[in-house]
Image (cartoon, helix red, strand yellow):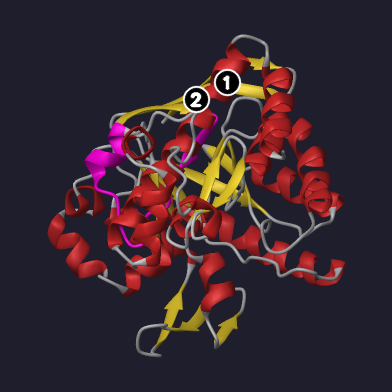
Amino acid sequence: MKFKLIKSDKSARLGELQFSKGLINTPVFMPVGTYGSVKTMTPDELIDIGSEIILANTYHLMIRPGKDILSSHGGLHQMMAWPKPILTDSGGYQIWSLSKKRKINDEYVEFDSPVNGDMIRLTPEIAMQMQKVIGSDIQMVLDECTHYPATKKEANLSMKRSEKWALRSHESFLQQKGDDDSACFGIIQGGMYPDLRLQNLEVLSSIDFDGLAIGGLSVGEPIDERMMVLESLMPEMSENIPRYLMGLGTPIDIIKAVSVGVDMFDCVIPTRHARTGHIYTHSGVVKIKNARYINDLKPLDEACECYTCTNFSRSYLRHLFNCKEILGARLATIHNLSFYIKLMADIRMSIKTDTFEKFAKNFIQSYQQ
């Protein structure tokens, strides 16, 4: 992997990530394909709307379809016919959020399978080996996600464990990497405590990671606490590696994070919310099931040129959702992801033309009307 910082508009950054499978322009939003599928979307459709990288999840893929089936396909790229880069989360967040029973110590984590209840053991080494089988281009270290709110003692203990796992993950990554151009990212933890976050950053910066992510956010914290963490971290992070904020967020969340120097984002919001009829537009969220749209002949977003907006009315989308037609979820997903991908393109153009602050102010004002 090669990362090039092209320019910055104050703190907002414009860059490129280069892989043999393709170029990624940053700031970038990565559609989430947890099980090796971005729900309702084909790979060709993702490429058509401008997606340059997607995210899949090691936790879920190791449970289903499992290591053997992924190996028989030669990895996830071949299995799902996706030719561009893939980032895989290691599964630490899912162990924290989904497992009813779990045992965690410095050596390993055991958790119950959401499929059949079997206990599964995961170590940093197993997590990296699984990501190698998946064939992901960006592989995340195994970490422990700190719950919110956490005391400083709890956050510190969790952070120290994640530091040990980060070193083991990186060593395992290097041992099996071979001659491909895959990358390994560390994950900064430390709860809502800036001093712990900076301590963790110092430790992770001593390991030769290809990029660094900020984990343990989007776990229920107020936006002012999240921004406090980001504003303390960003000025201290290396300019020469990509910065990835995991699991965030709404369009305004993304703009605010870009403003302090974040390069990469992922979130289930545009796809998950699309399936419930929550549509993201330049003037805010449209709840398409509402009666007010019963005879609304306008497109979802008059400023959008996606397939959905150029062909269908709000009235038709409301009809599809109220009749529980699968097409409604597909069309809403096409629009939401198109909206997010176009938002990132507009952000990049504003940084390139030194107008990011003006763009951000105008977008937020219009979005909140």
- From this viewpoint, is residue 70 visible? yes
Instruction: Please provide percent x and percent y for residue 98.
Output: 52, 77
| Pick the front one: 186 or 264 | 264
Q: Name the residue rendered at 79%, 44% in the picture.
A: 227
- From this viewpoint, is residue 129 visible? no
In magenta stretch: residue 88? no
Q: Residue furthest left?
A: 72
* In the rendered image, the vertical position of residue 323 relative to residue 183, given as above or below: below
In magenta stretch: residue 42? yes
Q: Which residue is denoted by mark 2 in the rendering?
A: 345
Q: Residue furthest front?
A: 295
The image quarter in which residue 274 lies: bottom left
Residues in magenta, as a range: 27-48
Q: Name the residue rendered at 71%, 36% in the picture.
A: 256
The kind of residue tagged 2 is Ala
* In the rendered image, the vertical position of residue 103 relative to residue 241, given as above or below: below
The kind of residue tagged 1 is Leu
Instruction: Please provide percent x and percent y for residue 25.
Output: 46, 25
The image quarter in which residue 119 lies: bottom left
- Tell me if mark 2 has few (under 14), some (14-19) or many (20+) residues whose alpha carbon lies within 10 angstroms of its own: some
Q: Name the residue rendered at 36%, 84% in the picture.
A: 115
Query: What mark, if any, has residue 14 been given in the picture?
Result: 1
* In the rendered image, the vertical position of residue 243 relative to residue 93, given as above or below: above
Label 1 or label 2, whichever lies nearer to me, is: 2
Q: CA distance from mark 1 to mark 2?
A: 11 Å
The image quarter in which residue 262 lies: top right
| Pick the front one: 191 or 123 | 191
Q: Quadrant of the N terminus?
A: top left
The answer to whether residue 121 is left or right of residue 49 is right
Q: Quadrant of the C terminus?
A: top right
Q: Name the residue rendered at 35%, 40% in the picture.
A: 308
